[in-house]
Amino acid sequence: MSFVDKAKNKLEETVGKAKEVIGDATGNEKLEAEGKAEQGSAGMKQAGEHLKDGVADAKDAVEDTFGTKS
């Protein structure tokens, strides 16, 4: 996962958390729900990026083991 992707996902997660807290504090259920949704979206993006990283690492390990490059 690139640094830029990590930063974007973390920012989305942080903004979502802020919306959730502000929504809760002000009784704005819509803002609170929006914040929770943004946090969930950021988490899913991070999970996808981690999966891509894992596949790339596994591919590299196989190439190192068997001496092949694709």
Image (cartoon, grey):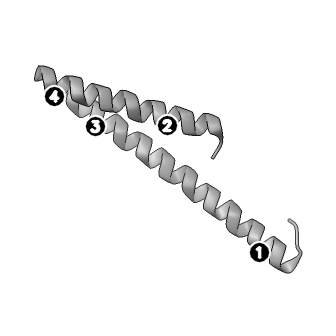
Please, what is the three-letter code of the amino acid marked with disc 2? Asn
Q: Label 3: which residue?
A: 36
Q: Pinpoint residue 69: horizontal percent, then vertical percent.
A: 88, 67
Q: CA distance from mark 2 to mark 4?
A: 22 Å
Q: Which mark is residue 62?
A: 1
Tag 2 or tag 1, which sits nearer the N-term?
A: 2
Mark 4 and mark 1 residues within 8 Å of each other at the beta carbon: no
Left or right: 44 as drawn, with respect to 64: left
Q: Earlier in the sequence, mark 3 or mark 2?
A: 2
SS assignment at label 3: helix
Mark toward the start of the polypeptide (4 vs 1)? 4
Q: Earlier in the sequence, mark 3 or mark 4?
A: 4
Q: State how far apart marks 1 and 3 are (Cα).
A: 39 Å
Location of mark 4 (residue)? 24
Residue beneath disc 2? 9
Mark 1 to mark 2: distance in Å?
30 Å
Q: CA distance from mark 4 to mark 1?
A: 49 Å
